[in-house]
Image: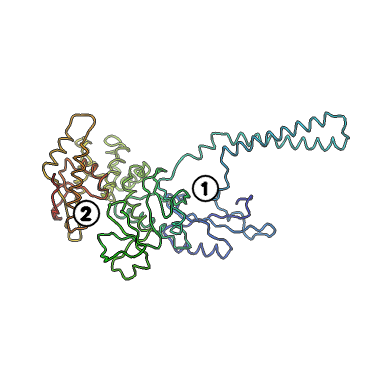
């Protein structure tokens, strides 16, 4: 509770996977006169993700509250937005304390001068002595406060950042407001559930924050406090891909743009003008969630840390401890294992079957060669890879590179130079022709993959990840007999 405020505040938690509990909590607090200030996700005591709900109400000074101080609960190391508002900047606080110390010293000097004077009576002397005593006590308190303010320990508390943060402009805050459904909050939980089920990748809690510096309808995604995406979405509008919607003319107030991930042209159309559309567009919150899915996979190296690796090791060890003892640390270090798992997740290769992955690593440890371990693992996971890039009929729509391109890339890769230098014009030309092949096909670009030789696969993925972020790159050797490769076209130069 903030005693200096005219309001009082309460922080409550509830599980993110129990919406009924959240509804019951909101109703219960409303009946007691509390209003919801904000709601966001946080890490719980048991490693799970919970909702932190901050409530506030007017503080009645003269009435006895029926609720006790334990209504204001401690939520681990959680520091609420209101706490930060009332918390002073350490520098400003230091200056204020120093100024107060200066004032106290000056007053003590004045009192001492009066006491040394012979022109005061006994009653005034007693009063001045009392004031001197109080001033000395205040000075001691201020000195202690100054020592606490300038202590380095205070700044150690500020160390550490959130892994995933989404900052929103004022126009977008309703997407995380429970009174308006908090669609973006629920979609972030759904994304965690989907990635866990599809990839075995459990993303940490997503923190939502307002940002007054953003333009209207703008948002940005930060990974470990570093901005990785900034874009616009529009409430009360739906987003459509321009090549998927048939319009004789664009409705008034339509906003044009480009999709961050695919680069495709998009249209934002007012919801009131889409009621008769066959196509179903994406809401503003759904677009942010879709981009967030790309970001958490693209930057998995910065999100997936040693604690995540330890959980995978614990899961595999609970099934077969021999595997762990045989592999780690003699063959693989924790850092090398993190690199392998993160690399698979980055290319959306499922790592859910942890025990199977460890079994394969153990099989490959006989050769004691780690340079091509990642590609060997991908071959072992070929069925899972094919399943993730094929349609319901087990058809993979692939684009190939001509022999001239692969020969040139092989030459670059086999150079003995310490620094690998590739002609920018060559890459741009290949990328341009690749885009033409994809655009001229009748297949949705999101379902097209690039099929390349095994020895070039990872190298080519690293190149084209910057050009077409959502393009999957697989090796011919990774296509198993259960799947059929349908050649969409060949990229030539």
| Position in image of residue 397 (x %, y %) | 17, 55
Number of callouts in the render?
A: 2
| Position in image of residue 107 (x %, y %) | 74, 34
Q: Residue furthest left?
A: 403
| Position in image of residue 373 (x %, y %) | 22, 39
Distance from disc 1 to disc 2, alpha carbons, whole Å, reads 43 Å
Q: Quadrant of the C terminus?
A: top left
Against 226, residue 114 (above or below) is above
Q: Residues within 10 Å of mark 2 (few under 14, many from 20)?
A: many
In primary-sequence order, the first of circles 1 and 2 is 1
* Residue at the disc numbered 1: 79
Of residue 277 and residue 254, the one placed in the foreground of this image is 254
Q: What element carries label 1?
A: loop
Q: How crowded is mark 1: few (under 14 residues within 10 Å), some or many (20 or more)?
A: few
Kindly check if marks 1 and 2 are in contact, taking CB atoms under 8 A apart as contact.
no
- The image's colouring method is rainbow
Of residue 371 and residue 468, the one placed in the foreground of this image is 468
| Position in image of residue 15 (x %, y %) | 45, 57
Place residue 237 in its image quadrant: bottom left
Of residue 313 and residue 192, the one placed in the foreground of this image is 192
Mark seen at residue 225: none
* Residue at the disc numbered 2: 389
Q: What element carries label 2?
A: helix
Which residue: 75% across, 33% down? 108
């Amino acid at each position: 509770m903030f005693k200096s405020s005219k309001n009082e505040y309460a922080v409550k938690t509830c599980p993110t996977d129990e919406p009924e509990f959240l509804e019951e909590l909101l109703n219960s607090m409303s009946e007691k006169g509390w209003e919801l200030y904000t709601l966001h996700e946080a890490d719980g005591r048991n490693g799970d993700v919970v909702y932190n709900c901050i409530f506030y109400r007017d503080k009645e000074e003269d009435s006895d509250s029926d609720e006790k101080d334990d209504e204001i609960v401690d939520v681990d190391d959680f520091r609420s937005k209101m706490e930060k508002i009332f918390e002073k900047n350490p520098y400003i606080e230091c200056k204020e304390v120093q100024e107060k110390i200066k004032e106290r010293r000056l007053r003590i000097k004045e009192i001492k001068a009066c006491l040394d004077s012979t022109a005061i009576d006994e009653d005034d002397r007693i009063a001045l002595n009392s004031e001197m005593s109080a001033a000395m006590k205040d000075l001691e308190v201020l000195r202690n406060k100054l020592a606490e303010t300038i202590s380095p320990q205070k700044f150690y508390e500020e160390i550490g950042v959130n892994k995933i943060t989404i900052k929103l402009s004022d126009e977008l805050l309703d997407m995380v407001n429970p009174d308006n459904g908090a669609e973006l909050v629920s979609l972030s939980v759904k994304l965690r559930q989907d990635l866990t089920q599809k990839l075995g990748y459990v993303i940490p809690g997503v923190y939502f924050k307002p940002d007054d510096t953003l333009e209207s309808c703008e948002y940005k995604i930060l990974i470990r406090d570093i901005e990785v995406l900034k874009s616009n979405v529009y409430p009360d509008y739906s987003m459509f891909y321009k090549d998927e919607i048939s319009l004789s003319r664009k409705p008034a107030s339509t906003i044009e743009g480009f999709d961050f991930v695919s680069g495709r042209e998009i249209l934002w159309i007012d919801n009131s003008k889409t009621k008769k559309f066959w196509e179903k567009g994406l809401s503003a919150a759904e677009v942010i969630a879709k981009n967030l899915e790309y970001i958490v996979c693209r930057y998995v190296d910065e999100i997936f840390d040693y604690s995540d690796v330890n959980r995978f090791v614990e899961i595999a060890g609970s099934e077969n401890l021999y595997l762990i003892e045989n592999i780690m640390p003699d063959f693989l270090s924790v850092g090398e294992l993190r690199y392998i798992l993160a690399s698979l997740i980055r290319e959306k290769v499922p790592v859910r079957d942890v025990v199977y992955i460890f079994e394969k690593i153990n099989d490959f440890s006989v050769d004691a060669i780690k340079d091509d371990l990642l590609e060997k693992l991908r071959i072992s996971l070929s069925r899972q890879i094919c399943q993730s890039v094929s349609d319901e009929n087990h058809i993979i729509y692939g684009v190939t590179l001509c022999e001239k391109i692969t020969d040139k890339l092989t030459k670059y890769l086999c150079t003995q130079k310490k620094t690998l230098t590739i002609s920018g014009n060559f890459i741009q030309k290949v990328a341009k022709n690749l885009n033409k092949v994809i655009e001229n096909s009748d297949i949705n670009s999101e379902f097209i993959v690039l099929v390349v030789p095994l020895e070039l696969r990872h190298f080519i993925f690293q190149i084209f990840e910057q050009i077409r972020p959502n393009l999957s790159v697989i090796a011919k050797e990774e296509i198993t007999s259960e799947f059929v490769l349908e050649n969409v076209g060949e990229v030539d130069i």
